[in-house]
Amino acid sequence: MITVRDLHKSFGKVRAVRGISFEARDGEITGLLGPNGAGKTTTLRMLYSLLPPDRGEIRIDGLDPTRDAMRIKRTLGVVPDSRGLYTRLTARENIRYFGRLHGMADEVIGARIRELVATLDMADFIDRRAEGFSQGQRVKVAIARAMVHEPQTVLLDEPSNGLDVMSTRALRGYIRQLKASGHSVVLSTHIMQEVAALCDRIVIIAEGRIAADGTPAELLARSRCESIEDAFVALIGTDEGLLA
């Protein structure tokens, strides 16, 4: 579970995050939405301890990223938007390397890789070098690498960006499995169809602040709109959301 209270972050004169508060509960998928430059990525980077907040409180499974960064890495799985695979390594080697960084024994890593290969349908490329992978293959390896240590809380930054229809369907199926297993999943995405299909709660960020927070049904009722996309635009108060 993630709890965020009054989170602030500035870069010089730019106030990227201005008092954000929300919760992401276990057994739920929380959508983090907002136009480009709204503060979503800055918020995510503070959650996984890449950036220290200027002010405010974060708790991830009871841990504080500013004091427990190494312990949080054991309970947190992160799929960043850059993916960041080592292209000279095979998919298996990428995953194994991260398992070793988490202090896992080789036999445990091997067992987890076998599970993830089966779950994510990676058998045909698991021993190929990552250089030249398709976008879908890169995302699968990034997810497997993030999940090798079986984290309770999962942060996904634009995971379906650039995926084809079949890869997107497979990814959504896996995210639903994480929810069913009791994980807390935070999904940052611009794809409103994905939000409607997956999210139990939606947190909308605009100009570094929370513009709205609630279930899809609550946000539709509040905005008096019939679609999540229309509700998103109405709640941030600008048509710029359509370009995000």
Image (tube, rainbow, N blue to C red):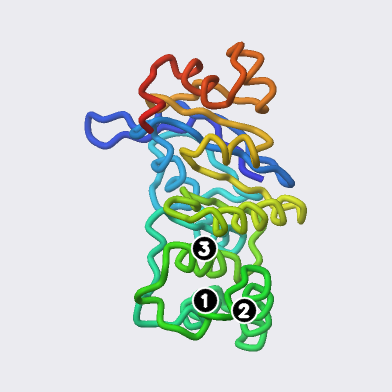
- Amino acid at pointer 1: Ile
Q: Earlier in the sequence, mark 2 or mark 1?
A: 1
Mark 1 highlights which residue?
A: 95
Instruction: Judge whether 98 appears above or below 217 on screen.
Output: below
Mark 2 highlights which residue?
A: 113
- Dot 3: within a 10 Å radius of its alpha carbon, few (fewer than 14), some, or many (20 or more) residues? few
Question: On the rendered structure, is 80 left or right of 114?
Answer: left
Q: Is residue 66 visible?
A: no
Real-space CA distance between mark 3 and mark 2, rounded to the nearest whole angstrom: 23 Å
Give coordinates of residue 125: x percent, y percent. Answer: 51, 79
Q: Earlier in the sequence, mark 3 or mark 2?
A: 3
Of circles 3 and 2, which is in front? Answer: 2
Q: Is residue 87 visible?
A: yes
- Amino acid at pointer 3: Met
Q: Are marks 2 and 1 in contact (CB under 8 Å)?
A: yes
Determine the secondary structure under disc 3.
helix
Mark 3 highlights which residue?
A: 70
Q: Quadrant of the C terminus?
A: top left
